Image (spheres, rainbow, N blue to C red):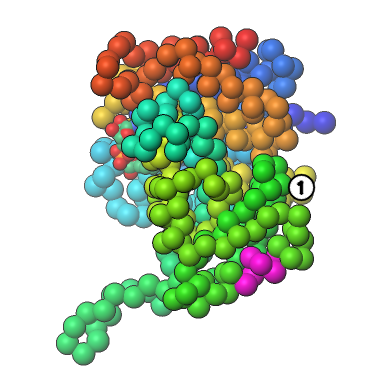
Amino acid sequence: MANPSILILAGDGIGPEVMAEVRKVIAWMGDKRGIAFDVSEDLVGGCAYDAHGTPLTDATMAKAQAVDAVLLGAVGGPKYDKLDFSVKPERGLLRLRKEMDLFSNLRPAQCFDALADFSSLKREVVAGLDIVIVRELTSGVYFGEPRGIFKEGNERVGINTQRYTESEIARVAKSAFELARRRSNKVCSMEKANVMESGILWREVVQEVHDRDYPDVQLSHMYADAGAMQLCRWPKQFDVIVTDNLFGDLLSDAAAMLTGSLGMLPSASLGAPMANGRPKALYEPVHGSAPDIAGQGKANPIACILSFAMALRYSFDLGDEATRVEKAVEKVLADGVRTADLMGPEGGTPVTTGQMGDAILAALD
Ligand code: NAI
Ligand code: MG
């Protein structure tokens, strides 16, 4: 059988710097564990614009559709800020998400013990936290029609429409229940069924999918505003949270910050199953291209390495190897190895991007 395939799109700014460390982990998997991947590499974002006049060529798009998983670094930077909207670096990323139909965005909020004091919340509230927010990514109020700014009488009116079809809700619900079965079998669905019809439908469809196909999973429903409060009060009550595009945007950013630095946060965006039964998938750190530190060896590669760990788990059924990578990260942090973004007020000497990658490799050994 062919090796599993990965397309690396390192992108701009610190993207290539953090991806270099992921490459070390991929090589380690081959050398030490006998797990080989077919790795190809291509351009996305500003670097693709520089080379081809577009942030994502059709050829790259076709490659992304054909591989088992795409790993993306980050796109954008001040150099590209004045470009026309249609060729901005972010358009490359949006095209990938749209054409691969990546409707299920997994945003873990995990608090490594060694970083618990980084949180704005008390240590006991966040230490050991490990939850995942599943955000619907391709529909809802960011896409619904009608939308626009219109003239009504003698004033302007701005309109966006929250619109969800039954099948759009069902497929993201299914994705959340599948995820829960790999974890502690608990899903909390969040909407505003008290004031929004789309929320009423959301609640009904999630419940139907549950009763029909996932009766073994513990399901609860919560209004999204109450959910935001509960996330700050006692986040460990949750395991998997599933919610729409808009609420998911806010809740996942808030949940992420419970745990500390942007340099630590991975994500996965999953679509429909391919012929081999695995979902179309794109893995990327939550952070951007960090132009303020690009080229200085300061970037924290952990978010990108943990994104690769998610790929091991969700695209390649290598959950044990994913855990091995996560444990290595945990050990390195416990040993006090810190990139600059993880330095507290007490100071100390930060390691470089490459040194952090090497420390993680040593811990893997
Ligand atoms: P950003 O995430 O790039 O940076 C925000 C702050 O966090 C900066 O101070 C940066 O130095 C720091 N930071 C981010 N990642 C880090 C890491 N791995 N290690 C250490 N420090 C890290 O967001 P910003 O500054 O708003 O955007 C910069 C550029 O990135 C823009 O062009 C923006 O459009 C783009 N962007 C791209 C994204 C993507 O590719 N998915 C997501 C967000 C922004
Ligand atoms: Mg956001």
**Which quadrant does ligand 1 occupy?**
top left
Q: Is residue 74 among the parts visible in the rendering?
A: no
Given residues 120 and 244, the one toward you in this image is: 120
Residue appearing at x 37%, y 19% in the figure: 339
Q: Is residue 301 above or below residue 61?
A: above
Given residues 258 and 50, the one toward you in this image is: 258
What quarter of the picture does the C terminus occupy?
Answer: top right
Q: Disc 1 designates what residue? A: 277
Q: Is residue 304 above or below residue 158?
A: above
Left or right: 24 with respect to 90?
Answer: right
Left or right: 80 with respect to 16?
Answer: left
Given residues 212 and 70, the one toward you in this image is: 212
Residue 10 is inside the magenta segment: no
Residue 49 figure quarter: top left
Task: Tell me where residue 220 appears, x and y as whole percent.
Answer: 60, 60
Residue appearing at x 25%, y 86% in the figure: 152
Residue appearing at x 45%, y 52% in the figure: 230
What quarter of the picture does the N terminus occupy?
Answer: top right
Q: Is residue 350 above or below residue 281?
A: above
Left or right: 260 with respect to 176?
Answer: left
Residue 89 figure quarter: top left
Q: Please provide the residue range marked out in magenta.
A: 204-209
Q: State whether the magenta stretch is mostly helix, strand or loop.
A: helix
Task: Tell me where residue 258 appears, x and y as whole percent.
Answer: 40, 40
Extreme-right residue of the structure: 1
Q: Secondary structure at mark 1?
A: loop
